[in-house]
Image: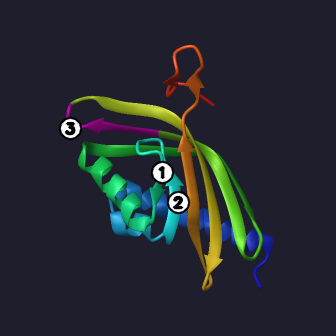
Amino acid sequence: MATRDQNEAEIREIIARWVEALHARDLDRMMASYETCVVAFDATPPVQFVGIDAYRDTWRSWLDTLEGPIEYELRELAVCADDAVAFTHGLVHMAAMQKSGRRGDGWLRWTAGWKKIDGAWLVVHEHVSAPFEVETNRAVLDARP
């Protein structure tokens, strides 16, 4: 049985490998962190993605719109894990140039629920969101931590 510190270290390593895979645009390595029945509430429509194939498709579509490097910074990462379930959250800065010439750049909130399945930590639920202005009902992507 792993200690709490060992579980948290394993999850931090998985997250670090996921970031490396994102920078390399390696969708297979990115998706290796997710359970097949993952449910994700991402920052882009639709409201929810059910299953790894649906989530893979949204990542593929987004990656296909980009050119050049992808900037990704995860701040204030918190990991809380026992031997079967874990939760992580942090603040994410993402920036990239779109093929259209528009630069996407913003801060998001990220939360993930993890489950240890056959000895491996996998994301079973992910939620990415942006704060919004109540007056305009628009997302605020330039808020800084």
Q: Magenta residues, as a range?
A: 94-100
- Categorize mark 3 by other alpha carbons within 10 Å: few (<14), some (14-19), many (20+): few
Residue 96 lies in the magenta-colored region: yes
The rendered magenta stretch, by its main secondary structure, is classed as strand
Q: Point out the residue furthest to the left here.
A: 100
**Label 1 secondary element:** loop
- Say above or below: 33 vs 92: below
Label 2 and label 1: CA atoms lie apart by 7 Å
Label 2 and label 3: CA atoms lie apart by 29 Å
User: Of the residues under marks 2 and 3, which one precedes in the sequence?
Assistant: 2
Q: Quadrant of residue 113?
A: bottom right
Given residues 23 and 33, the one toward you in this image is 33
Q: Amino acid at mark 1?
A: Gln
**Relative to 38, is 56 on the left or the right?**
left
User: Residue at coordinates 20% horizontally, 33% vertically from top-left?
Assistant: 100
**Label 3 secondary element:** loop
Q: Quadrant of residue 53?
A: bottom left
Read off the residue under disc 2: 39
Label 1 and label 3: CA atoms lie apart by 26 Å
Read off the residue under disc 1: 48
Read off the residue under disc 3: 99
Q: Amino acid at mark 3?
A: Lys
Q: Are marks 2 and 1 in contact (CB under 8 Å)?
A: yes
**Relative to 83, is 130 on the left or the right?**
left
Q: Position of residue 120 (x, y in %)?
A: 59, 79
Q: Which quarter shows the C terminus?
A: top right
User: Of the residues under marks 1 and 3, which one precedes in the sequence?
Assistant: 1
Q: Count the numbered circles shown.
A: 3
